[in-house]
Image (cartoon, rainbow, N blue to C red):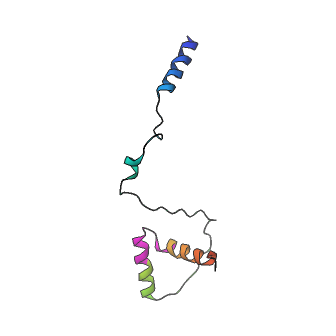
Amino acid sequence: MKISKKVSLKNELKEWNDPLEGDLSDFMSSGDWQVTRFELTKPKNKVITLRMSEELLNSVKKRAKKLNLDYQRLIRITLESSLYKRT
């Protein structure tokens, strides 16, 4: 009995089609794609106070909203990218 179960499982595996094989263009053509950012850095355990004009803060918040980000995250990303930008 055990042998027949193994054979049956082997046959099922042979008939199984990998969903990632073949043409995936139907899945890729959707316009619902969004850019996702992950902050994979050390924990944020320091608090700072930063003074800026109301106009600048409103511009940052507007840009962050367009990018679907929290404005504080956008400030961190911008600051970090300016530090590591090659000159």
Judge whether 33 appears above or below 78 on screen.
above
Where does residue 24 sit, x and y in percent of width and height?
42, 45
Where does residue 62 sit, x and y in percent of width and height?
40, 77
Q: Observer-nearest residue: 32 or 2?
A: 32
Please say whether residue 52 is one of the residues in the magenta stretch: no
Q: Residue at x 42, y 43 (%)?
A: 23
Where does residue 43 sit, x and y in percent of width and height?
62, 65
Judge whether 70 appears above or below 48 on screen.
above
Magenta: main secondary structure equals: helix
Quadrant, the N terminus: top right
Q: Residue at x 54, y 84 (%)?
A: 50
Q: Residue furthest left?
A: 31
Q: Residue at x 48, y 39 (%)?
A: 21
Q: Residue at x 50, y 87 (%)?
A: 52
Quadrant, the C terminus: bottom right
Q: Observer-nearest residue: 69 or 84?
A: 84
Q: Is residue 40 visible?
A: yes
Judge whether 26 appears above or below 46 on screen.
above
**Which stretch did the figure color magenta?**
61-72
Q: Observer-nearest residue: 11 or 62?
A: 11
Count of residue discs: 0
Q: Is residue 47 visible?
A: no
Which image quarter: residue 35? bottom left
Judge whether 40 appears above or below 10 on screen.
below
Q: Residue furthest top?
A: 1
Q: Residue furthest bottom?
A: 53
